[in-house]
Amino acid sequence: MKKNSFFRWPGELGFSLMELMVCIAILLIILTLSVPSFQATLNNNRLSVTVNDFYASLNLARAEGIRRGSRVNMAPLTGTDWTSGWTIFVDANNNNVLDDGEERIMAHGAVPKGLTISMTMSPSSTSFGFDSAGRGTAKGNWIFSLNDDLQRKISINFFGRPRICNPVTDTSCKTD
């Protein structure tokens, strides 16, 4: 009697080659469909993590300013490029620069590739500070963009309170 590969004989164990090939084909189809959406999820996660880290750093600087009763600043690690990372420090001489002898509270490393951070301050400055009452030294915004399609914005009001919003979907975010 000729053995058919699609049917099992009693007592046979395991998978036939045809069954294994069908399972692999189905798995490949599912993976092909899910990879693009997974990439979008990864990009959204990269943006969210960076924005939340920045937001937590702003809150830390504000809390340290209140706790210490002195001015605490947050500035880019290199020049005006926030994507290189940022540092929080006690600005004893109020010059917006981390000088020798001033205490560094925290430093954050560079952000993921493809992510940009742009800042607007009023009055114009390269750093942002909090005074002993927790108020900001300026009113400002940071816009975080990833691959020009995902955006988040952090706004700081006169009282020094930061807020995260999405300028693409939140109409109140555009007026901050």
Image (spheres, rainbow, N blue to C red):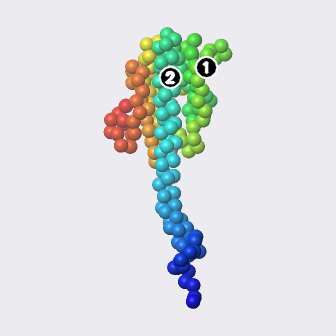
The image position of residue 37, as x and y in percent, is 47, 54
Identify the image quadrant of residue 18.
bottom right
Query: How many residues crowd mark 2 within 10 Å: few (<14), some (14–19), many (20+)?
Result: some
Question: Can residue 21 be seen in the rendering of this structure?
Answer: no
Q: Nearer the viewer, residue 119 or 62?
A: 62
Using the image, determine if residue 26 lies above or below residue 127. below
Query: How many residues crowd mark 1 within 10 Å: few (<14), some (14–19), many (20+)?
Result: some
**Total residue callouts:** 2
Outermost residue, right direction?
100
First reached walking from the N terminus: tag 2 or tag 1:
2
Disc 2: which residue: 60
The image position of residue 122, as x and y in percent, is 44, 24
Determine whether the residue tagged by mark 1 lies in a helix, strand or loop: strand
Disc 1: which residue: 104
- The answer to whether marks 2 and 1 mark residues whose Cβ atoms lie closer than 8 Å is no
The image position of residue 146, as x and y in percent, is 50, 44
Q: Nearer the viewer, residue 78 or 63?
A: 63
Outermost residue, left direction?
171
Residue depicted at 48% across the width and 49% down the height: 41
Outermost residue, top direction?
69
Identify the image quadrant of residue 140.
top left
Amino acid at dot 2: Leu
The image position of residue 48, as x and y in percent, is 48, 39
Mark drawn on residue 151: none
Residue depicted at 51% across the width and 26% down the height: 57
Amino acid at dot 1: Arg
Spatial CA distance of label 2 from label 1 is 12 Å
